[in-house]
Amino acid sequence: MQTTYESDQLLSEYLLMHYGTEQQLMPWGFGPKEAIGFPVRTVSHFPGGTCQRALDLGCAVGRSSFELSKNADSVTGVDFSANFIAAANHLRTVGSLDYPLRETGHQITTATASLPTGSHPEICQFLQGDAMHLPNNLGRFDRVHAANLICRLTEPEKLLRRLPELVRPGGHLVLATPCTWLDAFTPRDCQPAGDTFDWLISQLTPAFDLQRQCDEPFLIRETARKFQWTVSLVTLWERRAH
Ligand SMILES: C[S@@+](CC[C@H](N)C(=O)[O-])C[C@H]1O[C@@H](n2cnc3c(N)ncnc32)[C@H](O)[C@@H]1O
């Protein structure tokens, strides 16, 4: 199993991606500012209104979970990284977390992640766990969010097969993926052979109706002068009633 997401460098990069200010994330006026706020934008694809139970798979340091908490009675965030889950739990209980911000090379400053305004940390729980081997007693959810997770799994079909049981009939699933299939994460024979969207349709349509498909950019800042700009394929699905 991958330990990539246990590193302190990725912890800082994800705290910045999830909680950084626009000025911290993209200090250049000519940079792609529309790529900021990805963990907020993916959650905005759920239909309006409130719900009872929400699940955020691959929640990382928790921003989307806190966004889901604005319109849910309870939110469960699950991530394989113990380091990420510890950060999400720190934010949940303390409300803020200082982290190192790499400006250039070894030049480091300190930034502070804070809970988003209007979120409800008291209804969030964060669990370290494997999205391919979720506990049997999780129950059903009104909203399941899985952003940029499936192409980091060794066997993504294991999660896709479990989703119909996790989403209640009439409930919704938001699945985002940059389709960055890498042998280091997913053995070649477990990756889609062709187009990822076609593969998702074939995997999910027996139990879900596709409601929307769109593209959402996101930005990971490595230093103040080096960035990863990526486009995620976002799909919204409704669980069929049968
Ligand atoms: C590319 S990051 C995306 C994080 C976050 N959803 C976002 O959009 O910013 C992938 C996340 O999936 C987590 N992850 C990888 N394998 C996992 C697994 N088997 N079960 C649960 N989480 C996993 C990683 O620890 C990491 O937080």
Image (cartoon, rainbow, N blue to C red):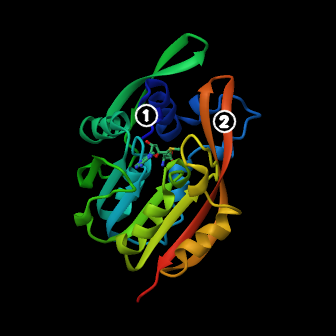
Q: Which residue is mark 2?
A: 228
Q: Nearer the viewer, residue 120 or 18?
A: 18
Q: Is mark 2 within 8 Å of ligand 1?
A: no
Residue at 64 percent across and 53 percent down: it is 179
Query: Residue 130 location in percent, x, y?
Result: 36, 50
Q: Is residue 154 shown above or below 158?
A: above
Inspect the image, locate mark 1, and give the three-letter code of the amino acid beneath it: Thr
Bin the neighbour count of mark 2 within 10 Å (Cα to Cα): few under 14, some 14-19, many 20 and up: few
Secondary structure of the residue carrying numbered label 2: strand
Residue at 52 percent across and 55 percent down: it is 150
Q: Nearer the viewer, residue 50 or 124?
A: 124
Query: Residue 222 location in percent, x, y?
Result: 60, 27
Residue at 58 percent across and 76 percent down: it is 211
Query: Residue 104 location in percent, x, y?
Result: 62, 15
Q: Is mark 1 within 8 Å of ligand 1?
A: no
Residue farthest to the front? 189
Secondary structure of the residue carrying numbered label 1: loop
| Comparing labels 2 and 1, the label whose residue is closer to the camera | 1
Inspect the image, locate mark 2, and give the three-letter code of the amino acid beneath it: Gln
Q: How many marks?
A: 2
Whether residue 43 can be seen here: no
Q: Is residue 75 shown above or below 220?
A: below
Q: Nearer the viewer, residue 233 or 80?
A: 80
Residue at 62 percent across and 44 percent down: it is 182
Q: Which residue is mark 1?
A: 3
Whether residue 26 can be seen here: yes
Q: Which of the 4 quarters of the picture holds residue 91?
A: top left
Mark closest to the chain's N terminus, 2 or 1: 1
Query: Residue 36 location in percent, x, y?
Result: 60, 43
For the C terminus, which image quadrant?
Answer: bottom left
Q: Are marks 2 and 1 in contact (CB under 8 Å)?
A: no
